[in-house]
Amino acid sequence: MDLGDLLRRHPVVDGHNDLLWQARTQVGYDFDRLDVGGHTPTTHTDLPRLREGGVGGQFWSVYVPTVLEGHEAVTATLEQVDGAHRLIERYADRLALATTADEVEATWRDGRIASLLGAEGGHSIGCSLGALRMLHTLGVRYLTLTHNDNTPWADSATDEPVVGGLSRFGVEVVREMNRLGTMVDLSHVAATTMRSALDATDAPVVFSHSSARAVTDHPRNVPDDVLEQLPGNGGVCMVTFVPAFVSQACADWDLGFRRLCAEQGVDHLEAESQALGEAYRRDHPEPTATVDDVVAHCDHVREVAGVEHIGLGGDYDGTETLPEGLDDVTGYPRLLAALAERDWSEDDLSRLTSRNVLRVMRDVEATARDLSAGRGPSLATLEELDGRPAT
């Protein structure tokens, strides 16, 4: 099998990359100082390496942390969206904004990389359906319903449950996303939220960067009963490369570190670069994940959900460590080669790289056309539906 030819015909459309957050924290979005047009040693991602990795479409995450709430979260998300637009404009010879599947494919014909936007966490809309609509107007094409913490209307996989999945307002968020054509992203959410969203949605869902819980028991991963619902829904699970999500040894190590941080009253993300993190690594050497760990998740999702319901969401620049062989965005061909050795056909691999997610995008777009013809913008509020004001 000629993987180079396959990737030229069916480039990777990756579900999640946090380069924009790195641009914000490292250089305040100054792309003169972080010139990703050439090799950038401080990130996993730059344009030459995307080309080398066979990436033809990237969902750039417009993530902001959950310590920001309400108007602060909305403003910071808008700054991330602005950063994305300026990134695309800066490298317009190699990047192009894409908001539909047709635009992705048109961008390929122009020899450029399609740039799509995804908002990572429902806190980014500040409990406002108007803000959700404006993010869509600015090009955002998925919203992850939560990040690491609950929203007032949805439970996160890594927080204590409050609403039991989705509240009434949460269901209305999903309905409005369906009407707009914004994909419902179920990475980061609790399993109860996954099930509630699958019950509520009229359109296929995505998991922009999640792996299989049966292979690695981590709350960020997708249980088999949810994977089994994807054929009926039409959605796609985009397997991620985060070591704690693909290797049980790494997951157990990560859990021990989080417990230590909780005992010390320290946020584990902040502790990563502090003395506590350094001491923990010294006393507990961090295990290493490999390409084979990711292969095991791809095999499992294909077996349970079917080859029509799998994609890739590496989470580059959103994690400190990566599996051996997948150290940066050049790693996709190595993963495809390992899958080909396990009897994945060219048709299977082309579905994994881009055909499945493009089909989901087209289905979401068609659903939005149908729904918007008979239903106007929702004016519902959290207070009206759930009986409490937005914080």
Image (cartoon, grey):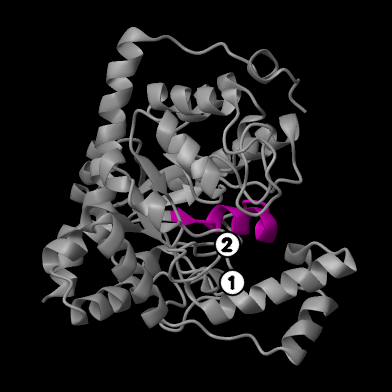
Residue 73 picture quarter: top right
Residues shaded magenta: 16-29
Residue 364 seen in the current view: yes
Measured from the top left, where is residue 341 in percent x and y? 20, 82
62 is higher (above) or lower (below) than 37: above
Residue at (13, 67) in percent of width and height = 346
Amino acid of disc 2: Leu
Residue drawn 57% across the image and 78% down it: 250
* Of labels 2 and 1, the one closer to you: 1
User: In this picture, is 378 found above or below 189?
Assistant: above
Circle 1 — which element? loop
Q: Secondary structure at mark 2?
A: loop
Q: Position of residue 377 (x, y in %)?
A: 47, 12
Residue tagged by mark 1? 42
Check if mark 2's residue and mark 1's residue have beta carbons within 8 Å: yes
Q: Quadrant of the N terminus?
A: bottom left
Asked if residue 304 lies left or right of residue 30, the reply is left
Image position of 226 (left or right of 161): left
Query: On screen, 105 above or below 362?
Result: below
Residue farthest to the right?
264
92 in the magenta segment: no
Q: In the rendered structure, which disc, 2 or 1, sits on the residue that comes first in sequence? A: 2
Residue 172 x/y as whole percent: 52, 22
Residue type at mark 1 is Thr
Q: Is residue 28 magenta?
A: yes
> Is 386 situated above or below 318?
above
Quarter of the image where the C terminus is located: top right
State the separation of the CA atoms marked 2 and 1.
Answer: 9 Å
Whether residue 11 can be seen here: no
Q: Nearer the viewer, residue 84 or 247?
A: 247
Q: How many marks?
A: 2
User: Which residue is identified by label 2?
Assistant: 34
